[in-house]
Amino acid sequence: MMHQQFQDCIDACNACADACDNCAAACLQEGHASEMARCIALNMDCAQVCRLSAALMARGSQFAAALCRVCADICRACAEECGKHSMDHCQRCAEACRRCADACARMAAA
């Protein structure tokens, strides 16, 4: 199947989306959501684009590489924001975003 050549990137996108959802939920529960608004918004954007990127790769869409370039950019922005915060969930999210950005950049260049 076409998607198997992109399986590492699909997996990185799905893991990143999960980490972003977890981070956004944790930020909302910590009682200072207004201070974390940018982090939460980027988490939501990142999770959405990661899931869409994974879906496009899985079905061999002609637009997968173009979306993966955008996904890498959003993942980098999310990693930068989450990396500013000391909470474990933010640090885990930042790492997942970095891995996904790297995987998406490689996929888009292939």
Image (tube, grey):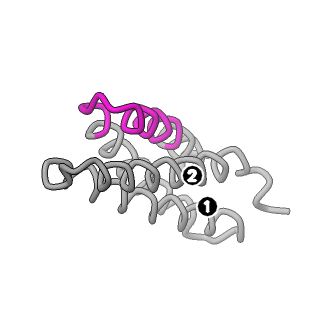
Residue 68, percent across and down? 50, 56
State which quarter of the image contains the N terminus: bottom right
Mark 1 surroundings: few (<14), some (14-19) or many (≥20) residues within 10 A: many
Q: Nearer the viewer, residue 23 or 94?
A: 23
Residues marked 1 and 2 touching at CB (< 8 Å): yes
Disc 2 target residue: 13
Q: Is residue 87 magenta?
A: yes
Residue at 40% over, 31% down: 88
Residue at 53% over, 68% down: 52
Q: Main secondary structure of the magenta part?
A: helix
Q: Nearer the viewer, residue 100 or 39?
A: 39
The region drawn magenta spans 82-100
Q: Is residue 109 above or below residue 98?
A: below
Numbered circle sitting on residue 45: none
Numbered disc total: 2
Residue 55, percent across and down? 63, 68
Q: Secondary structure at mark 1?
A: helix
On screen, residue 93 versus residue 33, left or right, reads right
Q: Please, what is the three-letter code of the amino acid marked with disc 2?
A: Cys
Residue 58, percent across and down? 71, 65
Mark 2 surroundings: few (<14), some (14-19) or many (≥20) residues within 10 A: many
On screen, residue 58 versus residue 95, left or right, reads right
Q: Residue furthest right?
A: 1
Residue at 55% over, 58% down: 65
Disc 1 target residue: 54
Q: Nearer the viewer, residue 110 or 41?
A: 41
Q: Is residue 60 above or below residue 50?
A: below
Q: Please, what is the three-letter code of the amino acid marked with disc 1?
A: Ala
Quadrant housing residue 81: top left
